[in-house]
Image (cartoon, rainbow, N blue to C red):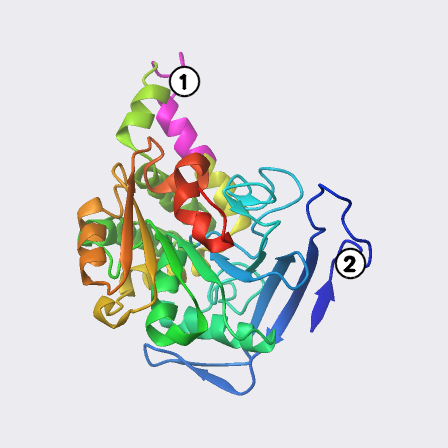
Amino acid sequence: MEHPQTSDPTTPASAGERPRAIVREGLLEVPGEMSLHHGGRLAGVHVAWRLAGPANAPVVATLGGISAHRRVYGDKPGEGWWGEIVGPGRALDASLVRILSFDYLGGSGDTTGPGRGESFPSISTYDQAELLLRLINHLGLKSLQAIVGASYGGMVALAFAELFPERVAEIVVISAADCTHPMATAWRSVQRRVIRFGAECGRGQEGLEIARALAMATYRSPEEFAARFSGAPRPGAEPVRFPVEEYLFARGADYAARHQPEAFLCLSESIDLHRVDASRIFVPTTVVAVHEDQLVPVTDLRRLVARLADARLHEISSVYGHDAFLKEAAQLKPALANCTGSLA
């Protein structure tokens, strides 16, 4: 099932204008049962996808964190979850390639995921990679020009490159390793425990709000928080409310209004279950490491690059820490240039 949302493909772009984007969206139905990497099975799986860009241009699959969705960019900078980085004329130039993405299995989007109060089988990055393969087969694509994956999406890119090397020319992996660091698992384990405790008390959304607030403290850097939130608590507030506290819980409330606790649990667990064999990945790989990233240490990414057969490492510095992939367009552009065949 497909729902085209296109600008008029019969009208050519004028001289000097960028090619008009053609947007296609659909819901891919997976026949029969899907066997999952960790042993579960799912029947009736459907995958919500979006493909946007100039007709017949090469295709770059673009995948983000567990909160990302299939709308990567829009008509204006800042639209879509990666609109500051991806789009016509941006660091990943969508006037030169078509951008493919999908809602993750087990998430809060329109792909199959857990319902309210429902249990859901454990999901692997290998399972997400299999769905991406089914999607490119459905679209009649021989191969992808690249997969650009950030955070969880970088894990999926690595899993795809290990399983299906003949179907992608290169991958770009931003702030993601071949396995998760135990300290990052420690933080996420506490987040999941908070959500489950909230659910047991009949306050699942409130548990998600608190868990997301804690997660936000790990996504950014101490340097950013020191610069933004060193002010005094709000006068007269009872209980005392610190500036950083107000920021974290505002972000937590916003997230909880748009996502399901069960989906957060599923994909958070998937991050910590992630393991790929880097020695079996031969696809050319660009790895981007952020010095201030608390979740994915630079040392882990240096070790990953040493185990890969064909890899380049870009190290950058950003006060945004793990969230640098959402903000640092200029620093990411050199790593993304090969995806479109452009020069940095």
Where, quadrant-wise, is the N terminus in this rendering? bottom right
Report the front residue among 281 and 264.
281
Q: Is residue 8 magenta?
A: no
Position of residue 15 measured from the top left corner of the image (x, y, whole percent)? 75, 43
Task: Tell me if 260 is positioned left or right of 188 in this view.
Answer: right
Magenta range is 232-250
Residue drawn at the location 65% of the way across and 39% of the way down: 76
Question: Which quadrant of the figure has residue 281?
Answer: bottom left
Q: Which mark is residue 237?
A: 1
> Is residue 123 visible to us here?
no
Marks 2 and 1 sit apart, C-alpha to C-alpha, by: 57 Å
Task: Tell me if 249 is positioned left or right of 98 in this view.
Answer: left
Tell me the element at label 2. Answer: loop
Vertical placement of residue 309 versus 234, above or below? below
Q: Amino acid at mark 2?
A: Pro
Q: Which mark is residue 9?
A: 2
Vertical placement of residue 211 versus 200, above or below? above
Residue drawn at the location 36% of the way across and 26% of the way down: 244
Position of residue 246 measured from the top left corner of the image (x, y, whole percent)? 41, 27
Vertical placement of residue 17 versus 167, above or below? above
Where, quadrant-wise, is the C terminus in this rendering? top left
> Is residue 169 visible to us here?
yes
